Image (cartoon, rainbow, N blue to C red):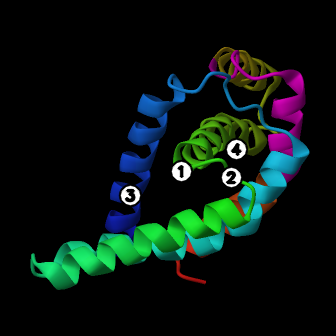
Amino acid sequence: MKIRSFLNIAALSLAFAFSTASLRAEPVVLTEDVLKRYMAIFPSYMRITLELDGTSKMREGAAKEAKVTELIEKRNALLTANGWEDFSEYMEVDARVVRAMTPLGILEKLKNASEPDRKKAEDTVAAQLQDYTPEEIALVKKNLVGLTKMRRDALAGR
């Protein structure tokens, strides 16, 4: 059940990020600082998000509204305290990280594949990452293991 909730949250988060990404004057660029701030608060951010998801089981009414408001304020305070402009900026970074992690993770798993298979995978990944700078790709590659572990641990509630 936790996995289903997380997947629902992730899908909604990505949908929100994609819908708000075009509202920003300038797109977010993944830098060492941005990724460091993202990773620093992701576990806390995810705990709050899972708590927000848990409010869906509460009966409608003042108590539920108060809890949702409290958690949204807690989330916003966490983001602001860690240098994020707003929720949409954090979600845009989250979406860019996840969109890069997926193909790079697949490529990592195919690093010992035959030359033709690896070349085909590299071409596919290059096409999927065409809106990333070489520096962004290198940054996500460098942090791929840590990002994967962080996201897995947060999902498991650790």
Q: CB atoms at circles 3 and 4 under 8 Å apart?
A: no
- Which numbered disc covers residue 9? 3
- Which numbered disc covers residue 84? 2
Instruction: Give me the residue at 77% from left, 42% from top.
Output: 108
* Type of amino acid at the residue the image marks with label 1: Phe
Quadrant (top left, top right, bottom left, bottom right) of the C terminus: bottom right
Instruction: Give me the residue at 58% from left, 27% from top.
Output: 24
Q: Is residue 82 left or right of residue 112?
A: left
List the residue tagged with mark 4: 105
Main secondary structure type of the part rendered in magenta: helix
Label 3, label 4: how many angstroms apart (C-alpha)? Answer: 21 Å
Q: Position of residue 21 (x, y in %)?
A: 53, 29
Label 1, label 2: how many angstroms apart (C-alpha)? Answer: 8 Å
Which mark sits nearer the N-terminus, 3 or 4?
3
List the residue tagged with mark 1: 87
Residue 132 is one of the magenta-drawn residues: yes
Q: Is residue 117 left or right of residue 16?
A: right
Q: Is residue 95 left or right of residue 100?
A: left
Assign a secondary structure to mark 3.
Answer: helix
Boundaries of the magenta span: 128-143
